[in-house]
Image (spheres, grey):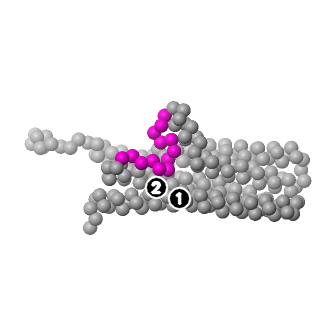
Amino acid sequence: MLRREESAYVAFGQYWLQARQQENTRLWMTNCISGVFAALLAVIAWEWPSFWYIAAFGLALSLFGFFMNHALRVLMVRYSRVANALMDSELQLGDYRRFVEGGDKKGVRGAWETLWSVHIAFVLFYAFGIGGWAALLTMTQGVFDWIVIFTFFALTISALVFYRVFLWPREREAETQPIVSEKRQRERHKPALTQDDADR
């Protein structure tokens, strides 16, 4: 039977690998989607005007990546925080924040690292993808140029606003919600009972 420290080490490794897997999945998913985008744009450039469903497929793929990026981020943060808690409390190896940017930093630096991170770069990529493919979709309908430009900016900004209002709070909750229950924390921080106290 494994000792408590060995069990904690095994659990830490599993959670860390799970967090790492979510990060790698997001990266490879974005690489594959970027490759499909490039192929679709090549088809559009070769045979313009192309059929509308090519742009519609690019838009649908952008929406899929937009929401999958959020889901993978939430899982990645949760697994990483559990690994961090095991490393700090059970293995006594200190705090570890591999996947959470801007962890304990305050002020302008903390706000900047929280705002501009690798994750936000993924969000911007998919938001621009949504706006860009929606604009191409309107171009296939033979509309005025100003409608295409308006569609691009409107859909891009709408995607970012939607992320900020509906998706970002869930990610912040995953970064800040307590991993250990309050009762468990009180028991862990309660001072040990000495022999003199027991005799009393």
Residue 96 falls inside the magenta stretch: yes
Residue 50 visible to an observer of this rendering = no
Residue at the far left: name it: 199
- Label located before the other in sequence (2 or 1): 1
The secondary structure type at the circle numbered 1 is: helix
Does 1 sit above or below residue 9? below
Res 169 visible: yes
Q: Position of residue 157 (x, y in %)?
A: 71, 43
Relative vertical location of residue 182 with respect to residue 57 in this rendering, above or below? above
- Coordinates of residue 149 in the picture (x, y in percent): 82, 45
In depth, the one of 49 and 141 nearer the eye is 49
Q: Residue at x 28, y 65 (%)?
A: 2
Tag 2: residue type?
Answer: Tyr
How many numbered callouts? 2
Contact between labelled residues 1 and 2, with CB atoms less than 8 Å apart: yes
Q: Residue tagged by mark 1?
A: 22
Would residue 130 be found to the left or right of residue 92 on screen? right
**Which numbered circle lies on residue 79?**
2
At x 88%, y 60%, the residue is 49
Please give the name of the residue rendered at 48% of the width and 57% of the height, measured from the top-left corner.
19
Q: Give the magenta part as a residue range.
A: 94-106
| Residue at the image point whose x is 35% and y is 59% from the top | 9
Amino acid type at circle 1 is Gln
Is residue 84 found inside the magenta-colored segment of the image? Answer: no
Q: Could you say where residue 34 lies in the image, as x and y percent from the top left?
A: 69, 59
* Quadrant of the snapshot with the N terminus: bottom left
Q: Nearer the viewer, residue 36 or 71?
A: 36
The percent position of residue 158, horizontal first and vertical second, equals 71, 45
Find the distance from the CA under tag 2 to the CA under tag 1.
Answer: 9 Å
Circle 2 SS class = helix
- Using residue 64 as the reference point, say whether residue 56 is left or right of it: right
Magenta highlight: main SS: loop
